[in-house]
Image (cartoon, helix red, strand yellow):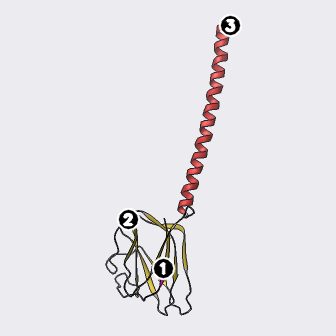
Amino acid sequence: MAQGDQNLQNGDALEINLNIKTLETTMTNLLLTANRIQQSIDQMKHGELGATAFLHLTTASTNSTLIAAGPRTLHSVRIWNTAAATYYLKLYNKATAPNVGTDVPIMLLLLEGTAGGVTPTFGFDHPIAFTLGLGFGVTSGLPIADVGNAVTGIVLNFGYV
């Protein structure tokens, strides 16, 4: 083997080793970045990056309210119903305030009546997606078409992203 051929082979081997090291470093950095992105996604799904709070005190109406337009995820609802009567929280996937009694809710939550003021909390293992917007209404009856007014003073606390 000629001297020039051996030098060329040694140079090629060195270049290949450098390319492998560069490739290994690039792959490691990509994996670390992918892991950080996945952690951020998981934190957002579970509201760990800071859910937005929304407080509502009911009035003697159906309380048709748009919390936020655009894609949202609902992480929790905390309720304090000191009234003796039971009411129903109806959640809507809408970009505008819901037309309670006409629009169809995607979820109904029971606001059980109690004079003692029990505070139920609805936390979701998997946040509920609202693709258009997050809205709600509160009625005195369970049927979707019910438009019975809620009582004044039920406290609703929403945590959403």
Callout 3 environment at 10 Å: few (<14), some (14 to 19), or many (20+)?
A: few
CB under 8 Å between discs 2 and 3: no
Q: Secondary structure at mark 1?
A: strand
Q: Position of residue 35 (x, y in %)?
A: 59, 49
Disc nearer the start of the sequence (3/1): 3
* Tag 2 secondary structure: loop
Mark sitting earlier along the chain (2/1): 2
Labels 2, 3: front one: 2
> Magenta stretch containing residue 154, yes or no?
yes
Choose mark 3 or mark 1, whichever is in front: 1
Which residue lies at the image location 47% right of the left edge and 76% below the top edge? 55
Q: Position of residue 141 (x, y in %)?
A: 40, 87
Q: Amino acid at mark 2?
A: Leu
Question: Mark 2 sits on what residue?
Answer: 132
What residue lies at 57% left-to-right and 47% top-to-bottom?
34
Mark 1 residue type: Leu
Query: CA gap, disc 2 to disc 3?
Result: 72 Å
Q: CA distance from mark 3 to mark 1?
A: 84 Å
Q: Where 141 falls versus 130 (above or below)?
A: below
Residue plotted at (47% across, 92% down): 85
Q: Quadrant of the N terminus?
A: top right
Distance between the alpha carbons at the discs numbered 2 and 1: 21 Å
Q: Which residue is mark 1?
A: 156
Task: Give yes or no for residue 1 being in the magenta stretch.
Answer: no
What segment carries the magenta color?
A: 151-156
In the image, residue 54 lies at what x, y percent? 47, 73
Is residue 137 shown left or right of residue 123? left
Q: Which residue is mark 3?
A: 3
